[in-house]
Amino acid sequence: MKWRHKDLLDVSQLSQSEVMAIFETAARFQEINERPVKKVPTLRGRSVVLFFAEPSTRTKTSFDVAGKRLSADTFSLAKSSSSLQKGETLKDTALTLQAMAPDAIVIRHWCSGAARFMADRLDCAVINAGDGRHAHPTQALLDGFTLHQEWGDVAGRTVLILGDIAHSRVARSNVHLFNKLGAKVRLCGPRTLLPPAVKSWPATVYSDLDEAVKGVDVVMCLRLQLERQHDGLLPDLREYARTYGLSARHLEMAAPDVRIMHPGPLNRGVEISSDVADCAQSLILDQVASGVATRMAVLFLHMTRKGEE
Amino acid sequence: MAKIDLVVRRAKWQGRDVDVFVSKGRIVELADSKAELDTGDARVEEAFGLQLMPSMTDAHTHLREPGFEYKEDIESGLRAAAWGGFGNIMCMANTRPVNDTDSVTDFMLDKARKAWPNGPRLYPIGALTKGLKGEELAPMAELARAGCVAFSNDGVPVKSTELFRRAVEYSSDWGKPVIDHCEDPYLGVAAGINEGEVSSRLGLPAQPDVAEALQVARDILLAEYLDIPIHLAHISCIKSLDLIRAAKERGVKVTAETAPHYLILTENFLEREENEYDTNAKVNPPLRTEADRLAMIQAVNDGTIDILATDHAPHANYEKETEFDVAPCGITGLDTALSVTWELVQDGALAEEAFFRAWVTRPCEIFDLPMNRFQPGDPADFFLFDPDEEWTVSAETLHSKGRNTPLLGSVRKGRVKTHFLRGKKIV
Ligand SMILES: [Zn+2]
């Protein structure tokens, strides 16, 4: 298919058929990841800059592996090695990157809207790898892809997103994605960790986890930023773990074959109990594998867009 | 009768064609136009049916000098004012150094006189606390003697209600009103976006309207208890209006202002695909909802809001061309204020009397500044305005150094053609 988007800033920009196209492409690449030689020449000679202004080993490694398996050259521009700490503006960083003429830039930044800011100023593809609290489209796509691999279709299923929704780009993107795929979305967390206008979101909101988890097909735990206690949003971690931590007890209340997801890295014993994280229904490691395939698909579709015109 | 030295012919004023007679910088008479008129050796300004307006007063401007001349300086700010229809400009104290000593006030007044000997007139607002730090009272007597017409901690709310109370009491000894920056410093963050659907979707830290209303409530209770007037700056939401309306009904001496952008823009501006994260719409207090906007217009009409003020806050392009979180708050406003508010009058949203009260008479009454109502003896401060001339808001058409306005690229109606202060042409 001819890909119409220069950038991937959020899943809200994608149609349902485009999401399915990403899944189909990812499924083809998933197969490569299972070969002994996990490399194809598809993007040979193309370059991808990994610009991570906020540290993230997982996502960055995932994109790096994805790029390399397609034979693209990947370059890192981490916060410590860039000039950001010396007060360089994002605009200057954009101009600098532009001058290096890469084919794609993967950006992670602590400010909402930063990926959009770069996309408006760069000719190459800009892939949002997480901007502030706004969006994390490839995480949502890999979550959707993981379930798509499990079930074939997620329409009609119920997904519970649990934890710090307010500060989570993962939650924001996943609410969009699962609605797009025809699933029902529930959100659960203390009021202090819900967005102020959560009522306007296409989701049902719960404050009681026992209620929220009833009959759901998936529980997606979010990582809790441990400093929320000091921001005055939580009493303490013990209270949080006992009230909003996912435990084996909750699995009984969910649908019989409930799947467990977590974007990682985990705080074991905080948002998720250790035995739940490791249980048979846990898809946490499948998510990591899907992450590489999904990011290969995203890089491929955005970087070969012009060539197919 | 005094010797007439200026006659403005055939201007439009409240639906009539009028001639204005000026002598020694003062209005002598405003009379229906006569076809034949012996103007003697007076200077004659043909208005050709342009709209006549008394010069407006902006009680809330940030001119950035000293300290941030790259954003705006007194000369450029007054130029924007002159072309914007403003005869009196009150400038806030958050300069560097802060205007908390008479030498800073003197410096500002001196700069203004040198740059614009005939105006627009500059009226500095002194700091309420030293360095705007909210720790010690500023020397308000000294500042009043140097020419400050009001005191304000604008930009940074005074956290201690005790200190704020003392500041209000102390300044009242010098007959100078306190202008309060209405923002509870402990609720939300001054993030430049309203807390609600748009901020939730964009994932931006935000400020709820109650942060403003809480401070408004505090100020009303203090003004009532102390029986001293307090002026409430840049009101933006219904919750504040309800409090102010009720306070006025029971006779509390509060006065209030809002800025033109709260009358014409809402948080939904940032909802538009092309304006997502547009830092030019980042302003403190933030743009609110459509219901708030309509209520603000109503409040200007019914007098709950006494005056309009620009809260002109110029910033350099590079400061705004950045992440939303990082960008400073503020909208440049002197150049566009007249056009956008007169458009509201033309559309029938804003009453013409309310427009004049809010821009001309009430600010002069509240802050005791020279005022022109075209009564004999009034200062001959007025301008001629073409309400139909269209112009595009752009770097070329703005006189301020600040181009930071969400109106950039939009077509406005109405341009100032010429401006007189005390009978002298300033543009
Ligand atoms: Zn203010």
Image (spheres, coloured by chain):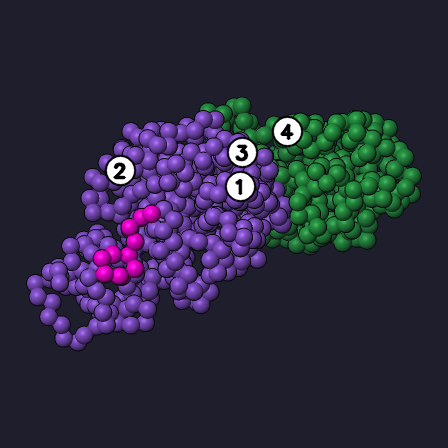
| SS for callout 3 | helix
Query: Which residue is labeled 1 in the image?
Result: B225
**Location of residue A67 by image quarter:** top right
Query: Which residue is labeled 2 in the image?
Result: B109
Residue drawn at x 32%, y 72% as measured from the top left: B15
Q: Earlier in the sequence, mark 3 or mark 2?
A: 2
Q: Measure the C-alpha gap from mark 4 to mark 3.
A: 44 Å
Range of residues picked out in magenta: B368-378
Query: Which residue is labeled 4 in the image?
Result: A56
Q: Measure the C-alpha gap from mark 3 to mark 2.
A: 32 Å
- The chain holding disc 2 is B
Chain assigned green: A
Q: Earlier in the sequence, mark 1 or mark 2?
A: 2
Q: Are marks 1 and 2 in contact (CB under 8 Å)?
A: no
Q: Residues within 10 Å of mark 2 (few under 14, many from 20)?
A: many
Q: Earlier in the sequence, mark 3 or mark 1?
A: 3
Residue drawn at x 67%, y 40% as measured from the top left: A166
Look at the magenta stretch and give its main secondary structure. Answer: loop
- The chain holding disc 3 is B
Query: Which residue is labeled 3 in the image?
Result: B161
- What hue does chain B carry in this figure? purple
| SS for callout 2 | helix
Q: Residues within 10 Å of mark 4 (few under 14, many from 20)?
A: some
- The chain holding disc 1 is B
Where residue B255 appears, x then y in whole percent? 46, 49
Residue drawn at x 40%, y 29% as measured from the top left: B138
| SS for callout 1 | helix
Of discs 1 and 2, which sits in the foreground?
1
**Both on one chain, marks 4 and 3?**
no
| Amino acid at the residue labelled 4 | Ser
Where residue A264 appears, x then y in whole percent? 73, 31
